[in-house]
Amino acid sequence: MSWYTGEQTYDTILALAFGLVLIVALSSAFVVAPYGRFASGRYGLSLNPRLGWFLMELPATLTFVVVFFLGRNSLQTVPLIFLAMWLIHYGNRGFAFPFLIRTPAGSRSSFSLMVVASGWLVTALHGYLNAAYIADLGSHYTSAWLTDPRFLIGLVVYYGALLGNIHSDAILRGLRTHAEIAEGQKVYRIPKGGLFRWVSNPSYLTELVAWAGFALCTWSLGSLFVLLISCANLIPRAAATHRWYRERFEDYPAERKILIPFIW
């Protein structure tokens, strides 16, 4: 067993990670992360959103892959399935999503370098905690786990939410025409269709549901950390986004909820 996957080392880093969840939850309750529609010049240097997103998410992939293949069980069937799930998620979120961002020509940088730097810590922890447990410490990832209800239900929930996430992102990208982007116009419209029928933030909803599915599927505290810190960041941001829509559009659908259909 290596130093980076030793149980004492892992448990210490895991405890610090859960402490970080509390810090993020408290800070997000008062300050919305300064990127996208909430970008602000008050936090110093900003990057192009494509570059900012790519750099922020990159450690999740790099750290996971490196730590995973150093694990003793990295070539076993179940860990390899989880590796595929991780790479599919961050292939979308860390590579495809930034590349597909439709930034108006001539628009100013809108992704705070502070967000990128803080994101590195979180995404590196994502990668380490999950890869070390999946490929080295997890003792229940035998062939029997492939028929466990937690694995099967988690798998369905994860991929169902992932498809909903990709669809919701596509709806948002389609709100601006090619002409508006080419002319540098920053036009905002009310998104419609898909999960937007029920909530203002389907991309956040499906992101959280996907991580809940992954947590159920892997049955590990490392995946629970990803879910909780995502909640700490995205739930306050969802409330702020819903409020932003209502303030900007007088005809915003009154029945549309913030994050949970029919409830909140």
Image (cartoon, rainbow, N blue to C red):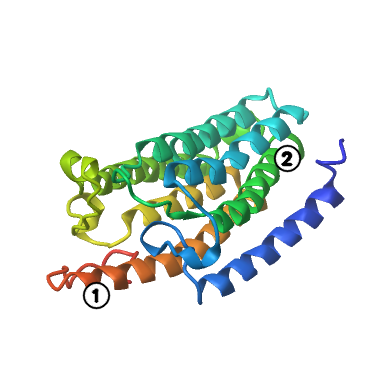
Q: Which amino acid does label 2 sit on?
A: Ala
Residue at position x 70%, y 66% in the image: 19
Left or right: where 263 falls relative to 138: left
> Residue 254 at x, y = what percent?
17, 73
Above or below, comparing residue 68 to residue 203 in the picture? above
Residue at position x 27%, y 62% in the image: 199
Left or right: where 220 falls relative to 251: right
Judged from the image, the secondary structure of the residue bearing numbered disc 2 is: helix
> Dot 2 corresponds to which residue?
132
Could you tell which of marks 2 and 1 lies nearer the N-terminus? Answer: 2
The image quarter in which residue 218 lies: top right
Badge 1, how many Cα within 10 Å: few under 14, some, many 20+?
few
Left or right: where 190 falls relative to 242: left
> Residue 121 at x, y = what percent?
66, 52
Q: Quadrant of the C terminus?
A: bottom left
Above or below, comparing residue 162 to residue 14 in the picture? above
> Dot 1 corresponds to which residue?
247
Badge 2, how many Cα within 10 Å: few under 14, some, many 20+?
many
